[in-house]
Amino acid sequence: MSAPPLEPQRLPNGLLWLARPVPGTQVAVRVVYRCGGRDDPTGRSGLSHLVLRLIAGASRYLEPGQFHRLIASAGGRTRIEIDEDFAALQTVVPAPQLERVLWAEAERMSNPRLDPETLASARQQLRQAVQEPLLNPYARLDLAVQRHGYLTHPYQRGALGDPEQLKDLDIDAVRAFHAARFGCDRALLVVTGAFDEGALARWVMHYFGSIRPPMPPSAVTAAPAVSPTASATPASGLPASSSSGPAAVPVTPPAAASPASPVASVAEPRELRESRRPQSQTLKLSLAQAPLPAAALVWQVPRADDPSLPTWQLAQALLGLGRSGRLTDTLVDEKALAHQLSLRLDSHRDAGLLVAQALAAHGQTAAPLAQALQQEVLRLADEAITDEELGKAKALLRRETLSAEWTADRLARALGTAWAVRGDAGAAAKDMAVWIKLGGADVQQFWRRQVVQAPVLTLLADVGAAAGVAA
Amino acid sequence: MTVDLHRRGLMLGAAIASGSTAWPALAQDGFDRPPEAPPATALPPLAIEQARLPNGLRVIVLPMPGAPRTAIRLIGEGGWLRDPAGKEGLAEVALSMLAQGAKRDGDEMESADIAYAGDLLGLPLRLTLTPSTCELALEALPDQCDDAVNLMADLTQRPLLAFEALEHIRSRALDALVLRRADALLLAPWAARRQCWGRAQPVQTTASLKRLRREDVLGFHRQYWRPERAVLLFAGDLSLQAARGLAEDFMGDWRVPKAPAGPAPAPALATATPVAAVAQFLQLPQGQGCRLIVQTPVPRGTPPGLRELARTLMHQRIAARLPWPWDSEIESLGGALCWRMGVTLPVAAVPEQLARLREQLPLLADEPVTPEDLALAQALALGDWQAQLAEAPDALLAQAMAAGELEAVLQWPQRVRAISAPVLQLLLAASWRDNRTQLLLLGDAGPPAPAQRAWPGLALTTMRAVIGE
């Protein structure tokens, strides 16, 4: 990005905010809480998602559905997003409506309605959101990538959560978690689009500056405690095994906190580390609904603020971006082994994954497909990268990054996500500066070290007679 | 993986009124109502500039001063409604084959070269097939527009359309067909169209794809990629003069073929009457939920602005009454209109939601349209228009052209504001009658009996009955 560095400003109550103009007729308002699936307590997968839905649902002065009507009557759109690292609410409206949206977002942040009735409704919405992706015949492969791609990190659970783990959750536990993790001092407000800078600063101070920061623990009524997720959660503790019944909520208040304080007892999420995969591993899945075999290869990737991330991005672009990425060129067009494939880089705060995933073309099976996919990924280390190929990959990346600045909607999302995941709203501009300097030899050397020599998880999903034992 | 939970109406009515007074410690006082709504601002119509080359090629420019890149689309007439009977899938195969090989200055470009050339511009070449049109889309920096138009000219005027490419694309189309039939979300629009329009609606099958010959592709290409029927659309920071210059440089020598132009799209659809009320349940094995679709025909010639207001208002109402993330559209197939609402449901929820839907649909359609309702629908229609213009203006114009409704989309603010509540009420009340509403369940909805009790007349059907094989 070409704009000056992006440093959020802090209000006296701790809320961070930043604004960036975008030409056009609209404005976007995004509120990001740095709390996502990774922060769900053990045995309560989906609690962050549930709280996000409660915040979005109703508040002291906004009856259920009223926020939506307010935005709709302004000609706007609104959505919520849950991620492993964050929860976000985003609204886009015609520019003259900005002040009303700021009022409404401040109201949702300040006074969410957390009661048994709204909890029941949010629970139902969450269950539906979890259910919908399962309609896809390959949903279990996606779940397996997450579940087995991470070895010990809570990212294994995904962001949506497990409705079974939330069905006996009481409202006090929800309030405690909300108070601890969704306070204004843990959020970022992003405003992008066509606005007057002076008016915006006044409105932000007026509507958001007046939100009270979370009260000290001693002032809060007692409620059951929930514990943070431990970094060593075993794979066996994940939804696959816990879906048969609700998991117990372990009570492990931090030593320094009063056991009577729900805010204090929802301890600060500590540094979560992912274990290194000790050796390569192959798992077979049975996908009952899937018509074509599929395969996925998963490598571990460092955390999102690691200085090597731009090199990972450039390598991913060389292999997987565009119609001429090496994987598509070889496996879909030349060898016709794959019907479709993708290579994605899932970057998160604490750890990430590089996932190469393919559906086999008719007549192919999963194992040879996986082998060919792996060969192509590894070949990046050996087969020369021409300047032209490198330039093409950089052009694709650059366009992808710059396009985030073209609309208020996209820019708000990009800034908020970069802040929550990378810890730096201006991370994209820094990535671009690194890409410019990287040469083909740098990428290859990096690839040899980070991927060729690294253990890989292989997931094979055959269909019909070729299907193996389910993982 | 970020999960975007956006659905307009996702939260609408989803919560239940509460009398609780337990507020969190963050409560803010003195802000009990929003600031006054600003007066609605008048939006000007969209201004485009147009020209025609001597060979008939239409050049359209949507000026966007300051835009860093230019979106470019070449739009032809070979949409999937042009598929000849028995050769369904031809339009898709013919379009895909354009990217498999072409000639430039006498040299052959292979598929990899074409892909590479598109990617060099920063955004891959996109091939889009709509019911009425086929499109090539690229995006370029201002000084790369000539490369983009040059590539489009090569692909449409000098494609190889080789036998080997046909086999490759056919194989991929067959795989895509297999995938579509196993996935309720992918299958739903095709099955729904079949349910609405019967056999008049072309649907590709394994047999129809296997029947395709290279001569079919060559003939289809000649018939539907013609300069006098094509449009070259630009959205970006360039003048009509510059756009016209690019068109002349690379497409000025595109000759009008001697063969006559193709027939109107899907002639059978032009006269087809929608199938009467019918309710079908197509079970897909071992799913974990199902796709529910209700649809009703809309009178031909209903203006797009009126359609959009009706759709928007009904969407609001149904999402408030049945709190699930609904989606909705009014699809135009060669002028035949079908209004469709869909939702994905877990198995356990199907019977109850079916019963409520059956009861609520006519009631919701009959509710009077108040001035507030009209204002809400107008605001949403205008807001969506602005959002699409910001996000992908070329796509908005291309869709409008595909539907033959460019003028309406250009004049959208004025057309939408001109619609009155009684007219809107009339369209709503005429739709969603018991004798016109069709229901389709796809996937796993549990045993049929409870669903059949909830929606009497719901009959089990098969893939063969819906798709034809």
Image (cartoon, coloured by chain):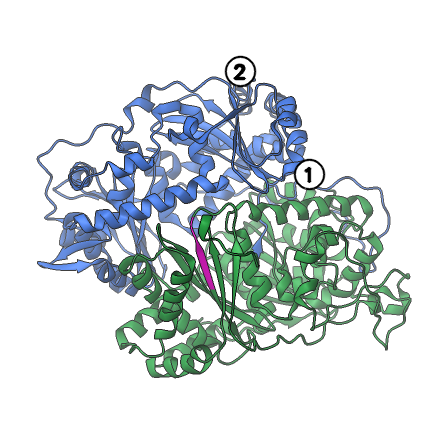
Chain colours: A green, B blue
Q: CA distance from mark 1 to mark 2?
A: 28 Å
Q: Is residue B249 left or right of residue A31?
A: left
The answer to which of marks 1 and 2 sits earlier in the sequence is 1
> Looking at the image, which residue is at 85% across and 69% down?
A216
The image shows residue B245 at horizontal and vertical percentages of: 17, 53
User: Mark 1 and mark 2, same subunit?
Assistant: yes
Residue B402 in view in this figure: yes
User: What residue is shown with label 2?
Assistant: B435
Asked if B231 appears above or below B203 in the picture, the reply is below
The image shows residue A22 at horizontal and vertical percentages of: 48, 60
Q: Nearer the viewer, residue B299 or B225?
A: B225
Under tag 2, what secondary structure? loop
Residue B28 in view in this figure: no
Q: Is residue B119 left or right of residue A6?
A: left
Q: Tag 2: residue type?
A: Asn
Quick check: marks 1 and 2 in contact, CB under 8 Å?
Answer: no
Q: Nearer the viewer, residue A288 or A313?
A: A288
Q: Nearer the viewer, residue B86 or A302?
A: B86
Q: Is residue B417 left or right of residue B317?
A: left
What is the chief secondary structure element of the magenta stretch? strand
Q: Quadrant of residue A106?
A: bottom right
Q: Residues within 10 Å of mark 1 (few under 14, many from 20)?
A: many
Q: Of tags 1 and 2, which is closer to the observer?
A: 2
The span picked out in magenta is: A292-296
> Looking at the image, which residue is at 19% across and 54% down?
B101
Please tell me whether residue B343 belongs to the stretch shown in magenta. Answer: no
User: What residue is shown with label 1?
Assistant: B13
Asked if A132 appears above or below A85 in the picture, the reply is above
Q: Quadrant of residue B92?
A: top left
Quarter of the image that includes the C terminus of chain A: bottom right
Asked if A354 appears above or below B36 in the picture, the reply is below
The image shows residue B379 at horizontal and vertical percentages of: 54, 39
